[in-house]
């Protein structure tokens, strides 16, 4: 492809654009767009804004899309999806095949040829749009499991580009990945990149070994050789915008809001908090069961302890997510029915998204933060909680299967599959000596502050830059 429509030196390609349509109605004109919440957007929007870069992605609605438009220093290029493509590519192959497979098959993955066919078609569309947007020799940074074929497709269209790929979710061990009927095609797609990044070194090693085994590439687990190119394979653990979190956390209004939260909860001695997307990988149900058992065994006093669980809606049309919501809400009802006092529920459950300043206030109000996924690439909530605790207070109970556990090793690490161990960790967190808790929090805060989202992006882009 020789024609370049727009000459952008840095292009991000991701499933979604970093915006959603605002409350101004159904208009698809550029005005009225709002920046979307979420870890990927929070991580990349500052980088692109600083570099006047472009973002290629789906705008979040089906059918025709607007022309490219500018938003907060970024040039956004919408990609259209039809209803059938959304169902087959997104709900099907991305979230009913790849998502469970890459999360240790917590739910059985489904394999359907028509899903795969749609995945190929949609990946081609993203690759073609990125090829039109990128300037000669530009850097193109492709993101996540929905677009694993884009690197090779883009390279065939624009061999002049430097192409990076970053996977935000876990990468499965070989014995699970080998179940995938299209394993060779997925690996070949990723090998189109110059840099392939993961959250954890083990994930990078899994990919390198699979590429050697299935595709037959040569090289080490750090540098692969494929079709005359060297491919850099390694971990780039993602982080958060620490400066932005600090700005909110140090605001007097946030401290006042945190105090108000405690009063609204009845000024409990202990407030436990969970903030998660409503996903079966997050372990919300096991967390609630552990809390229920601790109350039943009188290891926690319902008159002194409350749990707040924020469950952000996610993939609400997918049956497994509907089932998970029903399970969680049933558990909340059981616990409140058994242990609540009149007007004072022991579990406060919100099934909605909250503004980030309200989330930070909740982080500051909490005594114990429960981040207990069954499997997670990183989990930025854990890092947000740590960054929010400018008082060095609070205790983090963290799953050892979250990527964040590698950096936040001073947390109370737990295996969420071990029900007794999870209960013990929560009980220990509630009674932890404050001096010990403060030392642990100071240690974790130093690590998060040293390696923020800007460091993460700079490290990846430095690896992607051509060597001179």
Image (cartoon, rainbow, N blue to C red):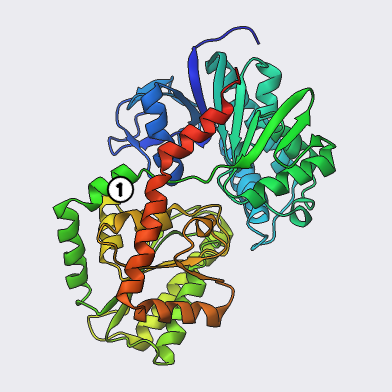
Q: Looking at this rendering, what residue extends furthest in the bottom direction?
A: 297
Identify the residue at image location x=66%, y=45%.
Answer: 204
From this viewpoint, is residue 468 visible?
Answer: yes
- Mark 1: secondary structure: helix
Mark 1, Cα crowd under 10 Å, few <14 / some 14-19 / many 20+, is many
Query: How many numbered discs sit on the rendered protein?
Result: 1
Counting from the top left corner in percent of width and height, residue 158 is at 65, 16
The answer to which image quadrant residue 453 occupies is top left
Identify the residue at image location x=55%, y=71%.
Answer: 416
Q: Is residue 250 above or below residue 126?
A: below
Rendered-image quadrant of the N terminus:
top right
Identify the residue at image location x=47%, y=39%.
Answer: 456
> Of 334 and 442, which appears nearest the observer?
442
> Of 457 and 117, which appears nearest the observer?
457
Q: Looking at this rendering, what residue extends furthest in the top direction?
A: 2
Q: Is residue 263 above or below residue 198?
A: below
Identify the residue at image location x=29%, y=77%.
Answer: 270
Counting from the top left corner in percent of width and height, residue 138 is at 55, 17
Counting from the top left corner in percent of width and height, residue 99 is at 62, 51
- In the picture, measured across the screen, residue 353 lies left or right of residue 237, that is left
- In the picture, measured across the screen, residue 338 lies left or right of residue 182, that is left
The answer to which image quadrant residue 262 occupies is bottom left
From this viewpoint, is residue 349 visible?
Answer: no
Counting from the top left corner in percent of width and height, residue 27 is at 34, 29
Rendered-image quadrant of the C terminus:
top right
**Residue beneath label 1, please?**
245
Q: Is residue 414 above or below residue 464?
A: below
């Amino acid at each position: 492809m020789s024609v370049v429509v727009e000459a952008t030196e840095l292009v991000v390609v991701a499933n979604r654009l970093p915006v959603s349509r605002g409350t101004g109605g159904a208009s698809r004109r550029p005005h009225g767009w709002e920046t979307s919440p979420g870890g990927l957007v929070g991580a990349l929007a500052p980088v692109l804004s600083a570099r006047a870069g472009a973002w290629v992605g789906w705008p979040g609605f089906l059918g025709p899309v607007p022309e490219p438009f500018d938003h907060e220093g970024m040039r956004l290029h919408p990609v259209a999806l039809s209803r059938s493509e959304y169902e087959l590519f997104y709900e099907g192959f991305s979230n009913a095949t790849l998502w469970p497979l890459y999360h240790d098959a917590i739910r059985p993955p489904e394999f359907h040829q028509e899903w795969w066919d749609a995945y190929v078609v949609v990946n081609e569309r993203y690759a073609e749009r990125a090829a039109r947007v990128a300037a000669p020799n530009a850097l193109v940074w492709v993101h996540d499991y929905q677009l694993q074929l884009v690197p090779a497709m883009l390279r065939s269209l624009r061999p002049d580009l430097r192409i990076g790929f970053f996977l935000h979710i876990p990468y499965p061990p070989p014995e699970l990945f080998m179940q995938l009927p299209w394993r060779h095609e997925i690996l070949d797609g990723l090998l189109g990149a110059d840099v392939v990044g993961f959250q954890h070194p083990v994930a990078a090693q899994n990919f390198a070994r699979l590429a050697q085994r299935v595709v037959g590439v040569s090289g080490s687990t750090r540098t692969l050789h494929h079709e005359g190119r060297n491919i850099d394979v390694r971990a780039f653990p993602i982080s958060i915008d620490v400066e932005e979190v600090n700005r909110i956390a140090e605001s007097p209004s946030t401290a006042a809001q945190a105090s108000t939260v405690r009063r609204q909860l009845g000024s409990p001695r202990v407030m436990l908090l969970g903030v998660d997307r409503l996903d079966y990988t997050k372990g919300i149900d096991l967390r609630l069961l552990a809390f229920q058992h601790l109350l039943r065994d009188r290891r926690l006093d319902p008159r002194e302890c409350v749990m707040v669980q924020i469950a952000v809606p996610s993939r609400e049309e997918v049956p497994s997510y509907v089932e998970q919501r029903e399970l969680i809400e049933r558990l909340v009802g059981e616990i409140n029915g058994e242990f609540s006092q009149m007007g004072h529920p022991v579990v406060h459950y919100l099934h909605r998204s909250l503004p980030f300043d309200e989330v930070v206030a909740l982080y500051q109000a909490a005594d114990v933060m429960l981040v207990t996924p069954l499997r997670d690439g990183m989990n930025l909530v854990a890092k947000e909680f740590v960054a929010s605790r400018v008082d060095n207070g609070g205790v983090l109970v963290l799953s050892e299967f979250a990527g964040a556990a590698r950096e936040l090793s001073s947390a109370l690490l737990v295996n969420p599959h071990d029900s007794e161990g999870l209960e013990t960790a929560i009980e220990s967190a509630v009674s932890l000596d404050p001096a010990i808790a403060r030392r642990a929090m100071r240690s974790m805060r130093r690590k998060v502050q040293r390696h923020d989202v800007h460091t993460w992006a700079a490290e990846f882009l430095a690896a992607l830059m051509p060597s001179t």
